[in-house]
Image (cartoon, rainbow, N blue to C red):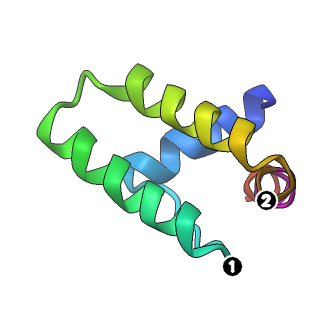
Amino acid sequence: MTEKVQENIKKILLGELEYRSSNLALNMLITKLKWKLQIDPDSMDDCMQEIETFSAKSPIIAKVDFANIAAL
């Protein structure tokens, strides 16, 4: 995951950017992590680790979505 993708994912999780994937699982993960951050604002590192784990399990999905996220 590039720095640009990480930066934009953090913005998405904080509500500064809007992103909708064509993949339901990624959309659900983003929603879950947004809630997690609202409850515990210090959990950004944990949230980013969950994104990394998701991308490791679904590399093809992550490749497409990460390219789209980088372009935001």
Which residue reaches farthest bottom?
22
Q: Which residue is mark 2?
A: 61
> x, y percentage for residue 21?
65, 72
Mark 2 residue type: Ile
Q: Which residues are magenta?
A: 63-68
Q: Is residue 41 left or right of residue 63?
A: left
Within the image, what quadrant is residue 38 found in?
top left
The relative height of residue 38 versus residue 21 in the rendered view (above or below) is above
Residue occupying the point 86% across, 54% down: 67
Residue at position x 81%, y 29% in the image: 2
| Relative horizontal placement of residue 27, taking residue 66 as reference (left or right) | left
Residue 11 horizontal side relative to residue 22, left or right: left
The stretch drawn in magenta includes residue 67: yes
Question: Which quadrant, please, contains the C terminus?
Answer: bottom right
46 relative position to 68: left or right: left
Which structural element holds mark 2? helix
Is 25 or 1 nearer to us in this picture? 25
The residue carrying pointer 2 sits among few (fewer than 14), some (14 to 19) or many (20 or more) residues within 10 Å by Cα, namely some
Depicted 8 relative to depicted 19: above or below = above
Label 2 or label 1, whichever comes before in sequence order = 1
The quadrant the N terminus occupies is top right
Residue 19 occupies quadrant: bottom right
Report x, y in % for residue 60.
Answer: 87, 55
Q: Amino acid at mark 1?
A: Ser
Q: Residue 22 — which label?
A: 1
Q: Position of residue 16 (x, y in %)?
A: 45, 54
Asked whether 20 falls inside the magenta stretch, the response is: no
Identify the residue at image location x=63%, y=32%. Answer: 52
